[in-house]
Amino acid sequence: MILLLATGSNVIASAQSKGQLKQQELSQLRQDISALKKHLKKQQGEKTQLEKKIQQAEQLIADNAHQIFSTQQQISILNKSLSKLNKKLSHNNQQLIAQQKLLSGQLQASYAIGRQEYLKLLLNQQNPATISRIMTYYDYFNEARSQQITEVNQLLQSIINDKQQISLTTQTLQEKQYQLQSEKKLLDEQQTERNTLVAIINTDITSKDKKLDSLLKNKKNLTLLLNKLKKALDDIPLLATEKPFSKQRGKLYWPAKGKVKKLFNHWRSVGKVKWQGHIIKAKEGAAIHSISTGRIAYSDWLRGYGLIIIIDHGDGYMSLYGHNQTLLKEVGDWVESNEIIATVGSSGGLKSVGLYFEIRHNGKPSNPSRWCKIKRA
């Protein structure tokens, strides 16, 4: 039995804001999950060479897909930065035109006054107060003109800096786009290799008996995993940052954008095994979101489910996201509602792309349709 150390649990219970685990606590949790995975491996038995090759291929795809996701995020940030810089440049250009017009008017006024012979104007005045007033006007005028020239020079320098920053950002953006193209090309090659392996293994298990045996083993493995996780996480409270999960029934978003294939409690093709969740047919690489606040309890490859993430929402509630292309969160990570946790894929030997989604309470499957009602835009 895999249990967290009592001392570790007591420390975790006093975790600070938003349920974040301290480094020592996080290390302890990951050690326990690692031990759990070794235990599962023994329970599952040895994988065939073909299964190992598929797992290796899917993990390579996951690594590359993770890099693609990161590159896309960087490109998005660069595009936003470039847009802001262009707006700033446009604003500064407009300001420069306005300042140049003001300066031009001042220079024309200065020329006109100069033609009236400044000294002559002063000498012709008999009243000392008038002389003092004229001197003050001239001082104000010269000070304003000097300030205007300074502002124009500052705007010119700002525009030069903006153009340099735009050029640098554009160059970086182009490099990232080339990098993305290269990563996607590699991903396509990896997918082709993986699909070939999947086709071979599917040919090898065409009989209903073999399929049923495989489904039963997969179901047993998942049940075992969930039971172990529940025991390991029982002593780790989740801080109440929103309504308890049980109060969110019917108010949650679906985890991914796509058509929901409602399979819960339906018999599978080989019979004797029922679906325990739904499949969401979504575009490969599409974002998968957490349906509610929680902590990542499991994030790894599992036979029959491929790359899977399991989130602990507290009070015995967990949500499962299977057959992912890549995983973006690690064990112990705290996630908010609607935070991106993975991308849609077909890992685990699937022939088609889709997210396998379950909700469980104390290990027992619950119909996701009762919980998720809101389509993701």
Image: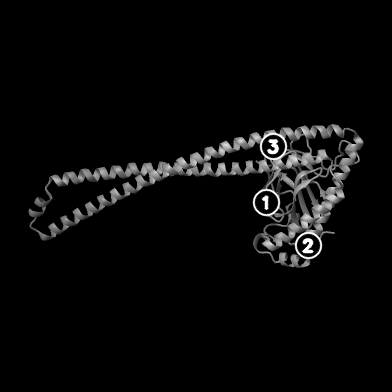
Mark linked to residue 4:
2
What is the spatial separation of the Cα atoms under label 1 and label 2, in whole angstroms? 26 Å
Q: Is residue 328 visible?
A: yes
Quarter that holds the N terminus? bottom right
Mark 2 neighbour density, 10 Å: few (under 14) some (14–19) many (20 or more)? many
Task: Give the foreground label among 3 and 1.
Answer: 3
* Residue 184 image offset from top left, x and y in percent: 64, 36
What percent of the width, then of the height, locates residue 375? Answer: 69, 42
Q: Amino acid at mark 1?
A: Ser
Tell me the quarter of the picture where residue 26 sits: bottom right
Local secondary structure at mark 3: loop
Instruction: Compute the Cα span from label 3 to label 2.
Output: 36 Å
Q: Secondary structure at mark 1?
A: loop
> How much space separates mark 3 and mark 1, taking CA atoms?
22 Å
x and y percent of residue 355 in the render?
A: 74, 41
Q: Which mark is residue 337?
A: 1
Q: Which residue is mark 3?
A: 284
| Residues marked 3 and 2 touching at CB (< 8 Å) | no
Amino acid at dot 2: Leu
